[in-house]
Image (cartoon, rainbow, N blue to C red):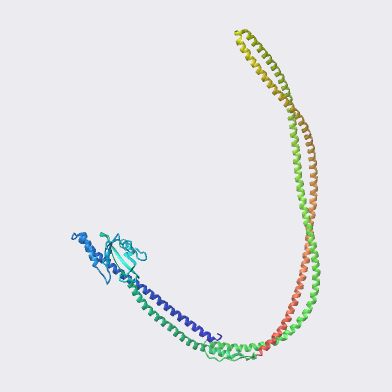
Amino acid sequence: MKKISHKILLAIILTSFILTTGFGMYNISYMINNHRNELKLLRESLLDDYDIMIKNQVETAVSLIEYSHNQYRLGNITQNEAKEQSKRLIRTLKYGEEGYFWIDDTKGVLIEHPVAIQAIGTNRIGIEDPNGVKLIQNIIDSGVNKTNDGFTEYMWEKPDDNSGELYIKRAYSQLFEPWDWIISTGNYIDSIENIVQIRQEEYTSALKLSIIVTVLFVLFSSILTLIIAIVLSRKITKPIVEMVNNIKKDEDGNISIKEINIQSKDEIGQLAMAINTMIEQVKHFIEETKQISDNVVDYSQGLSNVAEESTASIEGVSRAMEELTQGVAEQASATQNGSETLNTLANEINTVVEITNNLRNYIIGADKSGQMGLQAVTNLQDSFSIYNDKSNHLTKGIEILVYKSESIGTIIEAIQGIAAQTNLLALNASIEAARAGEAGKGFAVVADEIRKLAEGTAQSTKQIGDMVNDIQAQVINLTNNLGETKILFDKVDESILHTGNAFGTIEDAVKNTISEVDKLLDNTNKINSRKDLVVKVIEDISATAEESAASSEEISASLEEQTRSIDEISTTATELQHISTTLQSVISKFKL
């Protein structure tokens, strides 16, 4: 689709088709929704009229029962007569063609029914329709509790229809409280659906006619729009085609431009005037361009010659700079190596300083430990001196104890001798008491007790003697051990004395070592400070060498860049000359 006339036709036709189709679809949709709403309102209106009608009929039937009840209350008839009268009235009361009433009590027992006479007196509370709806229970609930405003719907077969088809039946019930009667009536409401169906068919026919009219209107509008679009597109595109024909290129590539003669005052006429003005400007532009291209050819030839001479000069300078750059680079490399060597030496000096500081700290720690050891040896000597004094006192005490134990042994021997003599005297006294007969019995008893006491004393004395002998043996053993211990402590005391002398010597040596290490550390720090100065000087020399090398390289790069620029200028001059020649060839193709 390259022609603008086709684009105009397509735009107008599509716009018209979319608008008319949209309007037609909206109209059809509106008619369908309106049709559905009307059917819904019709169905609701018919149902409301039916509900009002059967409700009024039931209220009429209840008023007849109330009349009979009032007769009973006034005493004109009995209650049974009033009930029978009410049944007759309900049995004979009709409305419409098939409308009738029936009576159930609140327990589900059928009281009166003009059609189902055989079921009167039976309880129908459990009757269900084919869908499981307990219709009698629901009718009673609607009458007593006004459930669903007293209305009940259920499915039931028509009495005169043996097809087995089910129809919706809608009933209304009302409670008569004095007798607990539920008065009900109901009818099949399929007639309402039949009316709605007839109206729906009428609406469907009207809807089909409206759709046909709408489609014809859309087609007619589309055809009319097509005719108008063709006329308008031709009117719009004709002057445009004329402008295109006045500016064209022939088979040889020559472009011919003619003045456009269009008298229209609209935008197309304004465009033609603008093109004519542009044609005049193009003529002047081509003439000036031709003159400029001639000048450019001359200038580009001269520029090319100058570029060749500049290139030869720069090449000589570039070679010299390359040699200079190489020497500076070698110097920078050597300086860099020296700087790295000095940095390595500086790191080693720093390591020596750090090790020397650590060594000094370790020696100071050793000096403190030696002083603590010397003090510990001194304390140990003092403790051994005290212990030696205590040991001497203990030895003297043990010697006194040995002497005392020997005295106790002498005393025990004396006691044992006294006990033996007492025992002998007691024996003699017993013999003399026996000789004395009755007169010596008391003395015999005393003598016997004295004998027992002497034996006990002898036995106790023997035990004490054994204990004293054991104590003496232990004391002698302890005395021997103390003697050996004293000999050992004398040797330890002598060793402690030698140890104290050794610690004193160590302390003197450590102090001398600390003094020497301080001197070493001072010299190392001086070397370290002078090392930093040397490293800085070498680094400055290296940096200067590197900057010189970099400057040389920049100069070389700059010369290379200038060489490339001059080459580009030369190339550009050649291209410019070629472009100017081409431009002259192009300009010659314009036929103005």
Relative placement, left or right, of 97 versus 518 is left
Q: Residue at x 80, y 62 (%)?
A: 338
Nearer to the camera, 206 or 107: 107
Picture coordinates of residue 74, whole percent (x, y): 19, 60
Q: Residue at x 34, y 74 (%)?
A: 194
Quarter of image, res 397:
top right
Nearer to the camera, 556 or 370: 370
Relative placement, left or right, of 26 versus 590 is left
Nearer to the camera, 410 or 309: 410
Q: Residue at x 25, y 59 (%)?
A: 179
Picture coordinates of residue 55, whole percent (x, y): 29, 67
Nearer to the camera, 297 or 380: 380
Q: Is residue 527 above or below residue 330?
A: above
Picture coordinates of residue 354, whole percent (x, y): 76, 52
Give the quadrant of the N terminus.
bottom right
Picture coordinates of residue 427, whole percent (x, y): 66, 12
